[in-house]
Amino acid sequence: MVRAGRNQQCPCGSGRKVKYCCGQAKGPSDAELAKAALAAEAKRAALHFANYDEPDFCELYGVMLELPTVDHSMLVPLPRLITPEIERLRRAIDDDDIDGIDAARPAAATRCDTPTTRLALLEAAYRLRDEGRISADLAAMVAVDLARRESDLIQSSLVEAVALDAGAVQTASGLVVATR
């Protein structure tokens, strides 16, 4: 069946053109909603750090970067088709090449970094907070980092996800995952 063009009569029978009726996307996209939610959460979360001094803030930031090694809900989902950027990261991890990992990480992250992925990570952090597994300040740090243009947590999460997928690291429970 051929779809009606934008300027043709809508098949619903309203008498309007498709572009003004059923063919019109209404409301913000999922990505726009996720961006707005992240911005609102980051604004609220920033209040947690009003009384933090720099060493305490930096220590909490370091703990945040380790979250993907602690709980798998904090891992970025890998795409079904591995991109060249992610494959470069995987090879650097296999070779235990720290400089190669650092070089490949930003480009690989751009392939997995979406507003909806960021929001899913924030929701995972909030679940960990609600379960009492992480502090409210650590969850707030996650919100602030994920609202940044280039999130270090996304990159840390991606490296851990690729390393786990490649079998280079063990899961939090001590299992080695065999893939492919």
Image (tube, grey):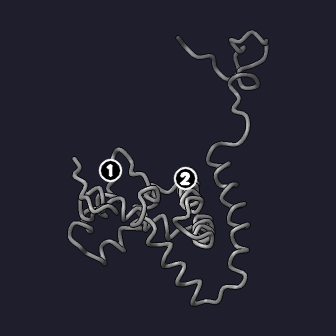
- As helix, strand or loop, the secondary structure at mark 1 comes to loop
Q: Amino acid at mark 1?
A: Ile
Residue furthest front as drawn? 132
**Left-right relation of 166 to 112:** left
Q: How much space separates mark 1 and mark 2, taking CA atoms?
A: 21 Å
When asked about the image quadrant of residue 56, the answer is bottom right
Residue beneath label 1, please?
82
Front residue of 31 and 163: 163
**Left-right relation of 59 to 43:** left
Numbered label attached to residue 98: none
Q: Tag 1: Cα neighbours inside 10 Å, few (<14), some, or many (≥20)?
A: few
The location of residue 19, given as percent across then percent down, is 72, 25
The location of residue 57, given as percent across then percent down, is 59, 83
The location of residue 153, given as percent across then percent down, is 49, 68
The location of residue 167, given as percent across then percent down, is 23, 59
**Left-right relation of 16 to 120:** right
Q: Residue at x 23, y 73 (%)?
A: 96
Asked if disc 1 and disc 2 are in contact, CB closer than 8 Å, the reply is no
Residue beneath label 2, please?
120
Q: Amino acid at mark 2?
A: Ala
- As helix, strand or loop, the secondary structure at mark 2 comes to helix
Mark 1 and mark 2 lie on one chain; the one further toward the N terminus is 1
Front residue of 115 and 176: 176
Q: Residue at x 55, y 52 (%)?
A: 120
**Would you place residue 164 above or below residue 55 in this image?**
above
Q: Residue at x 48, y 76 (%)?
A: 63
Q: Residue at x 36, y 59 (%)?
A: 161
**Left-right relation of 178 to 28:** left
Front residue of 141 and 116: 141
Name the mark nearer the viewer: 1 or 2: 2
| Tag count | 2
**Would you place residue 55 above or below residue 131 in this image?**
below
